[in-house]
Amino acid sequence: MSKIKLSADKLNTIKEICASFGNKSGEVINVLHQVQGKFGYLPAEVQEAVAHELQMPVAKVYGIVSFYSFFTMQPKGKHPISICLGTACYVRGAEKVLDEFKRQLNIPDGGVTPDGKFSIDTLRCVGACGLAPVAMIGDKVYGRLTPDKVKDVLAEYAE
Amino acid sequence: MAKYKLHVLVCGGTGCKSSNSLQIIENFKSLIAKNNLQDDVQVIKTGCFGFCEQGPIVKIMPDNTFYTRVKPEDVERIVNEHLIKGRKVPDLLYTNPENKEHVSDSKHMDFYKKQIRIALRNCGFIDPENIDECISRGGYEALGKCLSEMTPEQVIAEMKASGLRGRGGAGFPTGLKWELCAKNKADQKYVICNADEGDPGAFMDRSILEGDPNSVIEAMAICGYAIGATKGLIYIRAEYPLAIDRLKIAIRQAREYGLLGEDILGSGFNFDIELRYGAGAFVCGEETALIHSMEGMRGEPTLKPPFPAVSGYMGKPSNVNNVETFANVPVIITKGAEWFNKIGTEKSKGTKVFALAGQINNVGLIEVPMGITLREIIYEIGGGIKGGRKFKAVQTGGPSGGCLTEKHLDTPIDYESLMAAGSMMGSGGMVVMDETSCMVAIAKFYLEFTCEESCGKCTPCRVGNKRMCEILDKITKGNGTMKDLEDLRNLAAVIKDTALCGLGQTSPNPVLSTMDNFMDEYIEHVQDKKCRAGVCKSLMSYVIDKEVCIGCGKCAKGCPADAITKTEYIAPGHKLPSMVINSEKCIKCGACISGCKFGAISVK
């Protein structure tokens, strides 16, 4: 276990979460949900620690993290931008909105700006189809977007 | 609910919440307190009303006034005019798009006229966070009836007689499913609710759970009684935080009232429910994959048999139904199979909830009797195509379904006729497309989704769909050949025949149905290198007509790629030199076209 470089603090958090699920390997998905909720993402050393606590192979934990799209090994930006690419948003021009976000921030889908301020992700349906196309920044939903509104939306987050 | 004179119902569903309905509730509460009306007026945060296009929605009861697109600053007028003086605020009422008249009662809106609400019976009427309101509208009556008057066999017989079929997509008869599970003897059985709604553009199940979580809890308990299970599990997407919260509240309240837990209603029957969270995997809607995911594994499907009714969660007999299926159950028990049987068509009984979305005027959640036609849904309930454009296709069944066209508009909607038309019922996503949608790009869109979501276990789905997606990409970039079209059909046939689970077997449907109905568009992309909808960017170029351009330069200012510059040519009669687009820099976003008032820019 020498490879693990987590602080004692973080390690304790992981231990507590695993213990709250009785250290059962069958609860690994619930454990990962909580751990990601605390840390924001699931880097390799966190997966190793979870595997150790639940006494299961790291490969199995990694298999689960990589299988489910909700889990991420990449930290997100301070203001994570999620653009809905559900069918309803897609037919109302969500792709053009996505392209404009990518162009304005100069990062690809899944990328983070160098200053760590914004990250771009796509998701499938937030359920606000009446407002399509929709993007979320943090918990805030922006509806009826068009490419020319993107600049103003981003300006709200200027410091 | 009796002591208040007026009830203000404000939609707290995800759509309306996104457009600030919580602030509307706050404003109502503070203004009501300020005017000392708190003993007369109650503000209730409800689930989805369905008419999301017109959200946020505020409804005043008992006079049934339906205010649309309410903004937080409008609340003061509603309080002063309606609540205090009893006068409606006309400009906030729904306007009939045809005769421009204000309609105050939702019963008279085309959107609601043809709907029959069974699964959505309580959505938009009750506060989903208060079990008393559900009970006052007949909630848990069915559970009481089952436990006190019916044997498990009678419950199953009633379900079979009702003709209810699974609303998750495939349409397996629910009563039969329960019976199969009931027959298997085991020390422990499970009732599982599939709330892993992953179909992009569909939000039926979420709206039910957000608007009336108790209906699902009650139905699961009834199912548990019928099949002999004491444990229920709800597998819900982690992406639905509001639905999760409301389920947790409902489960807690049901336990407090003795409607879950031990010895329910003094009958000796025990039943309790736990939540399990999905983590974003479309394939987990498949029941064997769902069960694996609940067991803490990768959500990969396995071959059936054994069916979950024999060996499901933890190897025990399990009955998996979807949210909407469950929401129908209590009504069937209280009103009887015979009543339910009268709604719908010969083989498809009852109603179906659809999430109507896309290029349509009235986006929203609708519940319609089986057998209704697409024309009625699109043109009467949906209010026709946005911007008066021409209808092109409607996609049902999501990534497993297909496109229906003009010629299918009068087909009655039921499981069999949708299947015969090359699509399927699916979970209820219904996305309407007009002439601005490219059917090749839509097929590619769905296949990209399938490729992303394929679990990778079987080769036909993992590799076959990837290859199909590459071919479609080639076609949309203008590099396709006629041989590619043939290859697509061959690959599709192999995947359909050989994939392991429902996701793989149905994944070629979007391609096949668009090829069947829009072959001319495919051929155009291949032979003429043309995309008539103007979607496939590689096949387009933007040009400025130098004779029409007056040189105002608005396009250049609005161009996000700085691709537009001045020329030296001044057209006869104009004062300024015309503009030109550098096709290498142009990102084909279309901002210049929408900005040009003179119609000088076109797509070639």
Image: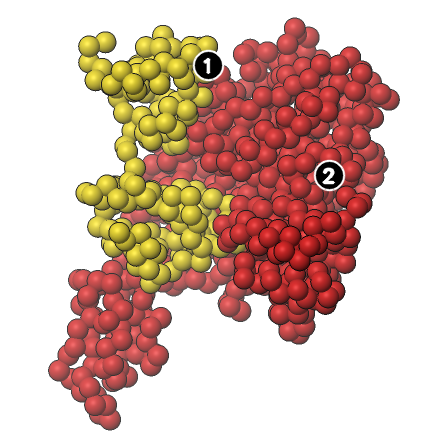
Chain colours: A yellow, B red
Can you identify the residue that label 1 sits on? A21
Q: Are marks 1 and 2 on the same chain?
A: no
In front: B204, or A37? A37
The residue positioned farthest toward the top in the image shown: B187
Q: Where is residue B440 in the image (x, y as percent from the top left)?
A: 39, 52
- The residue type indicated by label 2 comes to Glu
Q: Where is residue B479 in the image (x, y as percent from the top left)?
A: 26, 52
Q: Where is residue B301 in the image (x, y as percent from the top left)?
A: 47, 22
Q: Tell me the SS state at disc 2.
A: helix
| Residue B525 falls left or right of residue B155 | left
Up-down relation of residue B87 to residue B512 (above or below): below
Up-down relation of residue B577 to residue B36 (above or below): below
The span from disc 1 to disc 2 (Cα, nearest Å) is 34 Å
**Mark number displayed over residue B133:** 2
How many labels, in total? 2
* Residue shown at the point (61%, 30%) measured from the top left: B249
| Residue B474 falls left or right of residue B489 | left
Q: Position of residue B356 (x, y in %)?
A: 57, 51
Up-down relation of residue B71 to residue B550 (above or below): above
In front: B282, or B240? B240
Label 2 chain ID: B
